[in-house]
Image (cartoon, grey):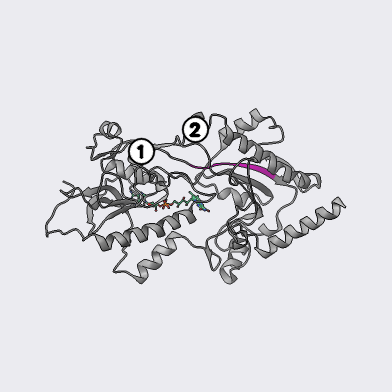
Amino acid sequence: MELAARSVQRLRAWLRLIRWQGDPNSRLWGRRCFHGVCYTPLTTQRHARHGTRERLLDVAERHPDLLRIELDALAARVLFDGQGNACGVEYLKGRHLYQAHAKPNEAPGERRQVRARREVILAGGAFNTPQLLMLSGIGPAGHLQTHGIPVRVDLPGVGRNLQDRYEIGVVNRMTQAWQVLQGARFVRDDAPYRSWFDSRDGVYTTNGVATAVIRRSGRRTPVPDIFCMALLERFVGYYPGYSKVFAQNDNMLTWAILKAHTRNRAGIVSLRSADPRDMPDIDFRYFEAADDPKGEDMRALIGAIRFVRGMAQPLAEQGFIAHEELPGAHVQSNEDLASYIRDNAWGHHASCTCPIGPRVADGVLDSGFCVHGTRRLRVVDASAFPRIPGFFPVSAIYMMAEKAADVLLAAAKATPPLQYQMGDRHGL
Ligand SMILES: Cc1cc2nc3c(=O)[nH]c(=O)nc-3n(C[C@H](O)[C@H](O)[C@H](O)COP(=O)(O)OP(=O)(O)OC[C@H]3O[C@@H](n4cnc5c(N)ncnc54)[C@H](O)[C@@H]3O)c2cc1C
């Protein structure tokens, strides 16, 4: 009887999965938080990646009078006029000036300025927006003075509150190669590439995630916080050349675990120097105890590793999995798993370094994205969130940008453009 009930339950679950096509954002879920087996949503158009870049290129082509994209232009600071309005940006013209480039240019670049008629909007991301604000004299006064930058607004929250996920991989070697990866060398002109190019078909239409599971790390966790992705590759995070490893293995299964809604807010972005070509100093302060005294994030990650191991076990018993390569079957105790996680966890969703919030509570932006203590200067990017959103941030960033567009249009109606005379100089 119990067996029959369980079979009906499973059948219902499969039928549900087919009806909403594995999309965790399906309307069929209404306002409930999804958990269970699903696909990883993709942002694609005609089976090709489609994101901000494509949107910008499209708008620039359709409205060249409204959007001009200038490449090889490194923003160096925001310019202000005598009334304290942000009225432009100074930038360095030249190729590969930012020192994060694999082969950075040692030249200083040519200093140029552009003017804003209405506002300056920074969207440099969670690392570079706070850097740009600090280079413009907006940030923690003591820190700016250390680097000889005149203080325009003492705003201690700039660069603080850096947040990210914790991600960790459990890597299995299969006994046989994946059929779906046959011929995949991850280069132009291999067989799957030609299939994708000619008919938008095959494995290159995917992001390499076979399936995913969303779950709560604990019964009392208010929303699901664990995302486990089954990748048909050896994946242990991002580093230069990380994707080259994919071509070297065709028999790997990585359960990539992503812990969302992490407690740690202790990360910080600060200046190394007053030179805009320098990378800022970025310290995530992972697993810092202050925000998570009970170590709940670590406990959730250890639980998630045990969970994906549980899913892999039947495959190992049936001879499909040869062995677990990472962390390895010998890593079993909570202490050993914690040390594996501490040494290997990564993240790639950095956010929250210029959060919306009251100035007295280290907020950097008001609810209209304006930088506290400034005029006509806004920030619209991942740095504006007070808390890191969801599992994957770009849809939340797009929504924020839509909201900001409404705010900007309303402000444009209410505020006259800045007036300049020929020959005006700014930022002096
Ligand atoms: C490898 C990787 C994979 C990811 N995959 C996903 C995913 O699948 N799904 C998801 O939701 N999120 C993903 N993310 C996260 C997502 O890409 C980011 O959260 C998002 O792009 C942040 O948007 P943003 O507008 O804040 O900043 P960004 O997208 O980083 O945009 C900032 C822009 O400003 C430019 N810039 C910075 N400083 C200057 C300067 N001084 N002068 C001129 N230009 C400057 C930068 O070049 C960049 O183009 C991924 C991130 C990485 C690193």
Dot 2 crowding, Cα within 10 Å, few <14, some 14–19, many 20+: few
Q: Can you give x and y, in whole percent of width and height, for residue 13 in the image?
A: 73, 57
User: What is the chief secondary structure element of the magenta stretch?
Assistant: strand
Q: Is residue 331 above or below residue 186?
A: above
Q: Quadrant of residue 258?
A: top right
Foreground residue, 134 or 106? 134
Q: Amino acid at mark 1?
A: Gly
Question: Image point 14% across, 52% down: which residue?
Answer: 425
Q: Can you give x and y, in whole percent of width and height, for residue 281 in the image?
A: 39, 36
Q: Amino acid at mark 2?
A: Asp
Mark 2 residue CB less than 8 A from any atom of ligand 1: no
Q: Is residue 277 visible?
A: no
Q: Which residue is mark 2?
A: 291
Foreground residue, 197 or 404? 404
Please report the bounds of the magenta region as a residue range.
Answer: 164-172
Q: Earlier in the sequence, mark 2 or mark 1?
A: 1
Q: Are marks 2 and 1 in contact (CB under 8 Å)?
A: no
Question: Image point 16% across, 59% down: which residue?
Answer: 419
Mark 1 residue CB less than 8 A from any atom of ligand 1: no
Q: Which mark is residue 53?
A: none
Question: Image point 21% across, 61% down: which residue?
Answer: 416
Q: Can you give x and y, in whole percent of width and height, for residue 279 in the image?
A: 37, 41
Residue at the extreme right of the image, as rendered: 1
Foreground residue, 96 or 70? 70
Dot 1 crowding, Cα within 10 Å, few <14, some 14–19, many 20+: many
Is residue 391 left or right of 182 when viewed as pictured?
left
SS class, disc 2: helix
**Distance between mark 2 and mark 1 Cα atoms:** 17 Å
Q: Which mark is residue 157?
A: 1
Q: Is residue 424 above or below residue 224?
A: below
Is residue 8 left or right of 231 when viewed as pictured?
right
Q: Can you give x and y, in whole percent of width and height, for residue 33 in the image?
A: 60, 52
